[in-house]
Image (cartoon, coloured by chain):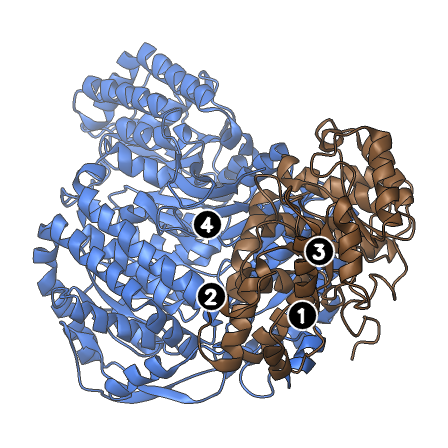
Chain colours: A blue, B brown
Amino acid sequence: MTVKEIFETMEYGPAPESAAEALAWLVDMGDSFGCFIDGAFTDPGETFETKNPATGAVLAHVTHASQDDVDRAVAAARAAQPAWAADPHARARALYAIARAIQKHSRLFAVLETLDNGKPIRESRDIDIPLVARHFYHHAGHATLMESALPGRMALGVCGQIVPWNFSLLMLAWKIAPALAAGNTVVLKPAEYTSLTALLFADICRRTGLPPGVVNIVTGDGAVGEMITGSDVDKIAFTGSTAVGRRIREATAGTGKSLTLELGGKSPYIVFDDADLDSAVEGLVDAIWFNQGQVCCAGSRLLVQETVADRFHDKLRARMDKLRIGDPLDKSIDVGAIVDPVQLDTITRLVDASTEGEIYRAAVPLPETGCFYPPTLITGLSPAAPLMREEIFGPVLVSTTFRTPAEAVQLANDTRYGLAATLWSENINLALDVAPKLAAGVVWVNGTNMFDAAAPFGGVRESGFGREGGVEGMMAYTRPVDSPDRLTRIEALSGDGATTTPLDRTAKLYVGGKQARPDGGYSAPVFGPSGTVVGEVPKANRKDIRNAVEAMNAAAGWAKSTGHARAQILYYLAENLSARATEFAARLEEMTGADGSTEVDHAIRRLFTWAAWADRFDGTAKGVPLRGLALALREPVGKIVAFAPDATPLLGAVSLIGPAMAMGNRITLVASEPFPLAATDLYQVLETSDVPPGVVNILTGAHEELAPVAAAHLDVDAVWSFSGAPLSAEIERRAAGNLKRTWVNHGRMIDLADDRAFLEAATEVKTVWVPYGE
Amino acid sequence: MDTTAPDRTGTLPSVHDPRNEPMPLDMAWVRSARANTSAIERRAATLPGRRSIKKDWQAAWLARAISCIDLTTLAGDDTPGRVARLCAKARRPVAPELLDALGLPDLTVGAVCVYHDMIGPAVDALQGTGIPVAAVSTGFPAGLSPWHLRLAEIGESVAAGAREIDIVISRRHVLTGDWQALYDETRAMREACGPAHMKAILATGELGTLRNVARASYVAMMAGADFIKTSTGKESVNATLPVSLVMIRAIREFHERTGIRVGYKPAGGISKAKDALMYLALIKEELGDRWLRPDLFRFGASSLLGDIERQLEHHVTGAYSASWRHALA
């Protein structure tokens, strides 16, 4: 085409980014890679091909790591960890050096990522790689400040990390930077489709003089991931599909390994009728056509207010026709290649199976070869349509409409996932009202897919748990310095003596603000030290758990109550407990034989502590590079079922109820199994202290019978076990069902006075991004 | 070849499309304007990373940019001689050997833009070229001279041979929210223009917010503006990509609702070839190829041409160029 002709057509021409340097690096490395273990590359073992999805060309051969490779990597990491943890400044220098090296080789990383993954060079160059560098810079700071910012916490040890193929290097950075900053060493596995930038990163680690063993990279498919999960590591950090995350939850159950999961999503993208519609359309380009829609937090579910839906869809279709699909190395390409033919097939199959709605595909040419899928919009779907519910992980946007803000929230939250949400409105009242109501770990207002190392990122519900970024992310790579003592189970006392109580007093369950008889209709005697019956308690069964969860559901308003109101009620509880201190002390002595007055005093003190925290555990505004706010809000986890410790039955109960209430949660407490009467006495105090019905429910019964029911309950958000009964493995395994949060003791003492640990367990971080400017 | 567009430069604007005739002021539409500044800035900031125009395409696009330049001199010391020089440059914006190499020997700029008193010399100097003369008017740049004089100035400029009139709006009407007054004033000016095409200068750097830019754009178009234009070049902030985005999205919306294509002219501060490419890409992306013609798009610029000339010489010869190798305007 001549200049004169282009002058008339005004077409775009090719603008290729050269792959020469990246291909030369592959040649230099022999086109064949071993693993990176203990500071050096191993000889390639059994290898597989890694391909450029845009062309199908083989880029290199990558080793399928063996069990021996994984074991040696873990051993190297283990050996390197003490020295690495010992010197925060050295860690900061190393992270800084990595950040600088990534910037110095930024284009090499970007081109290699695009070659391997198929994402447009614009994205790898302008988004992925700068965020990677930013992550290492930011975490150099966390290494420096760890002692002052996270007092009393230390590294976990060796972390096994498994990252996906959609943001190969960026997810590596999100995993490695905080782990290293906190003093951990790592064994990381990149996804088998996209190993190359991780291997270049390993090369950079070697060249920057990172101590051997601090970072180990093993390559391969899910089988290698399973080897890491099963190896002697202290933590597994996984980003990937919900199905695999669930398997990892089950596989690590009861092992005591720390776990964070960043999983799938079907994130809502809400457009209100007062939004800047053109900007909201453009936002969708960044939401669902970013990285071909292969983004866990992609705004893939469009919810548009009915009044503007037709106009919005028209604008959107017109915008789609302007997208340019093709060679990812072309600098003017918006949508690149799908990562692999397998993924392309999955997307195609999901869309083709849809029998509802109207499918619009962007009227743009697709390359004739390579893995490409056109940007697609499907309108007119009902909430029940499979495409509205299942993650497609491709450039496919599904859409439905809503009438009111309340309905928008309802539709947005009608999902098993809860990773991110986007909303568009020019009305600050509406935006800031809706943002907290969305079940998501991240909410973007008038923008989308904004990320930064200083802002926590992560999900709720089946999108996983744990946060990456900010000091919140550092928490997930640290543990308390004091190692907890072993916990000895306390068996219930037995005897054959008759009751000593002159008038029968019947303890019941406390559900929904009412004393309730157990569903099963059975009770069990509680014996005192002298072998006499001091009372009888109901034996709760699975239906009582069900009823308690329904009572917690009915008390949803508690989450919206003010910290001040919650503090007042906690103080009132303390006041009423204090008024009956003598009675409670006597009851404790009756059950345990020990003087109860100190325990009652401690319980009152805990209530004061939690009343104090109720309006004090604030969110933070993060220092992100944006004109706007990134607010890391602390929200209640939701509905908690907690198994009380055996010992100190009153203090134990209060220590669990207090933080749950203070942070706006609803809780069902299963009383100390050997000494249940302190908790059942407590409901009389609850009844007289203005605690709304359903906020606190108290059950008695066998922990080992009730824990599996609670852990499997799909409408419970968290299960805590402080019990002497060996519940941890069972709870963690069954929690995989809805990926609820678990906090279990693994047979060790949990410090009831560790405020920080309770605050973390009782809250969920929601990061709300609000760019502003007029 | 696109038959709906003029096939060469220098033709009258809007010869193929119907002109934008005034319509009643639609306040509901004006009030519905939204402009989210952060999102608009983000779109503008990421555009250069999304579109890269290289080699022959760059040369062709830069030639297109030249064809859309309103080559401008608006200085107190303008003289007939100075204007004649500018017009000579307008006729031959690039060295003939470079234009021959590009296969575009007849390339000219879109128009020459001067003050009223310079219309005569400009018309004389452009005799036979078909290049229209545009005159800034209505008390340019502040627009605060007596109303009857502002209207009379339009009539006199048209009588003197100006085929395009760049009017300035009363910024105070925007800032006080008197949209009716803005509409009435702009519509009266449009009528005073008669056959000459009217470009409405919004002076966006003085309107305070992007929302005001959007609203003023709608009012100007409802009042019959053939073009809407960012700036006089005399404000402290002139054309920017975010402001352009707001204005061209308003033009797009206006076209969607009325079927009428209104032109766009960013002015002031566009001096680099690379900037020109980004403006063209923005227009192509947000409005479409039809707007990449001088009847619907102009750059108001004085020094842009010099930079484009150097880039074109580099394209033809492969060697980086120097400013003194190209004729002065």
Amino acid at the residue labelled 4: Val
Horizontally, residue A404 falls left or right of residue B57, namely right
| Residue A400 numbered tag | 3
**Disc 1 versus disc 4: nearer the observer:** 1
Dot 4: chain letter: A
- Name the residue rendered at 18%, 86% in the picture: A43
- Which residue appears at 59% of the width and 55% of the height? A283
Label 3 close to label 4 by CB (< 8 Å): no
Residue A30 spot, x, y in % from top left: 24, 88
Q: Which residue is mark 4?
A: A460
Answer with left or right where residue B304 lies relative to residue A216. right
Which residue is disc 1 drawn over?
B92
Q: Residue at x 20, y 59 (%)?
A: A97
Which residue lies at the image location 40% right of the left edge and 78% below the top edge? A116
Tell me the residue that label 2 is attached to. A123
Residue A249 in percent (x, y) is at 36, 60
Q: Position of residue A402 (x, y in %)?
A: 72, 48
- Mark closest to the chain's N terminus, 2 or 4: 2
Q: Secondary structure at mark 4?
A: loop
